[in-house]
Image (tube, grey):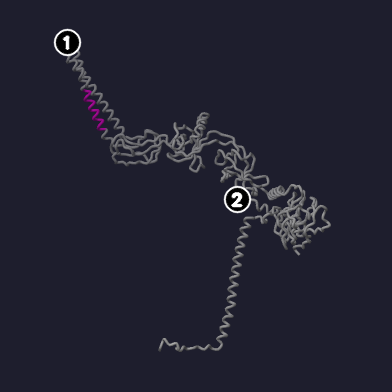
Amino acid sequence: MDHNSNNSTRPTTTPAPGAADAGLNTGAAAAPKRRSRWLGSTIAIVLVAGLAGGAWYLVQSKKNPSGMSAGAPGMGGPPGAGGPPGMGPGAMRAMAVTVGSAAAKRQTLPVTLTAMGTVVPTTTVTLTTQVSGILRDVLFTEGQMVKKGQKLAQIDPRPFEQALQQAKGQLARDQAQLDAARVTLKRYQTLWDQDSIARQDLDTQAALAKQLEGTVLTDQAQVQTAQLNLGYATITSPIDGRIGLRTMDPGNYISAGGTTGIAVITKIAPIDVSFTVPQDHIPSVLGAQKADARLPVAALDRAGNKTLAQGVFLTLDNLVDTATGTVKAKARFDNSDGSLFPNQFVNTRLTLKDESALVIPVTAIRTGGNGDFVYVINADRTVTQRTVIRGMSTVEWVAINSGLKEGELVVTEGADRLKDGAVVALQGDTPTQAHGASSGRRGAREGGPREGGGRRGNGEGRGANGAAPGGAAPGAAASGAAAGNGAPAGGGGGGGGAAVEPNAGQPSAAAPAVTPDQPAAGAGGSGGSGGSGGATSATGSSQTAPAIKPEEVPKGMAPAASTVQPAQRANQ
């Protein structure tokens, strides 16, 4: 076959009958599947958006737990139908943080110096031998309390006994020669008196007697030395104290002058504690020691919680350590019960004197970027962060040099959940006390007349059918009727929506003045106060006040831009 030919024939396939209809049916079936996929994607996007919105709402609700909209400073009444709840006494109590408290008071505190110290034995002895020999016996138990002169070890004494006998024999021989020389000298003296011998013989015999006297003295010293060495073969305790672990076992050869010794004895009753005092406090310590020669010192455990022993201050060292800027000090403790152990680390507390100071519990002190501070509880149960300067302190109390007055309450427990201006409840408060505190606080914020008429409330009252921000006229779903010169304003809230007066921020013209004896009725909600003084009064009804006709507006007041129609009851 010619592959270059363009006239090559190819087999053709004739479509079977109905194939076209099958293709149309397949395309028609694919269209619903595509729509289903788009619908599923849309639903997934909506769910994701809903989750994101819910998360955002939760975050915002945590940031604004009171449920009040931004810019709604007023305190509404009970919730109306269709409107969010107002900030009633129950809500205020829910916002309060229960804390512990204590009052600042005058109290006598000891002026103390605290430092780390080391227990030092008054006497430490290394038990060594003064003669060499075989250690025959060890007569003590490790850790035993020993007395001065108690026999502790024995070196083989036989060599020293032999040396003593030899010295005594030498002494006896020389003593006999001395006695013979003295007899001969006496005979020569008689012959010299008779002029029977020469003077030279007499002098020679006298010199020989004196020579033998010296020899006898030497022999006597040797005998005493032998006796002393024999005594050194028995090792005794030089002090009262506690003996440590032995470093040599019986049978070993021990040499005189060894540095390790057999064991170490420490005197633990009484015992000393060595610590350091900053050089800035040296004048205070010396002055207190002049006033009281027996300054009390307490030895505490490492945590500083338990007192181990009580002692007295001894003295300061005679120079300051230039490397640390401190001077060594020493205190002495009786330690009859053995509570202090040699080389033990302890905390020492030296009491110099007692002073009267304004104190609060240590738990009330907080530390921040500006130093130490406390939370002071005000009369309206709010807290104020106040910086203080602390002074001396004990385990439970700390002196306040400045920043507090006597009788002021401070927070001692629960301060981690507080910030400046937070509302608190004391542990002993009853619900009535908490309500009274919150009401007084609300009255203090809202009370007091303003000159020049009331101003519009800046809250937002949410109703069932709409919202009317700003200072709406009576009957509107707004933050409250504007009441001038101390007139109480009812909380705005539930009910139908109302038009917004364009003159927001101006003195109220559309709303008639409300007297204190005739509070404006309005639905309770989260609406703000009317801006003027006076306590907020809410009827708790969801029905708004009737509309005010233009002819009923008092003279001197501009008519509203639009008339507000009565709102329908929200529960109909």
Mark closer to the chain start, 2 or 1? 1
Amino acid residing under circle 1: Asp
**Magenta part of the protein: which range?**
161-176
Q: Indicate whether 94 appears above or below 16.
A: above
Q: Which residue is drawn at 26% across and 34% down?
A: 159
SS for dot 1: loop
Q: Indicate whether 34 appears above or below 434.
A: below
In this rendering, the count of numbered labels is 2
Which tag is nearer the camera, tag 2 or tag 1?
Answer: 2
SS for dot 2: helix
Amino acid residing under circle 2: Arg
Say if residue 132 shows up in the picture.
yes
- Magenta-drawn stretch, dominant element (helix, strand or loop): helix
Say if residue 427 shows up in the picture.
no
Disc 2 + disc 1, Cβ < 8 Å: no
Q: Residue at x 80, y 59 (%)?
A: 547
Observer-nearest of 83 and 291: 83
Locate residue 497, reporting x and y percent. Answer: 74, 61
Q: How crowded is mark 2: few (under 14 residues within 10 Å), some or many (20 or more)?
A: few
Locate residue 202, reporting x and y percent. Answer: 18, 15
Observer-nearest of 309 and 89: 89
Residue that badge 1 annotates: 195
Residue that badge 2 annotates: 417
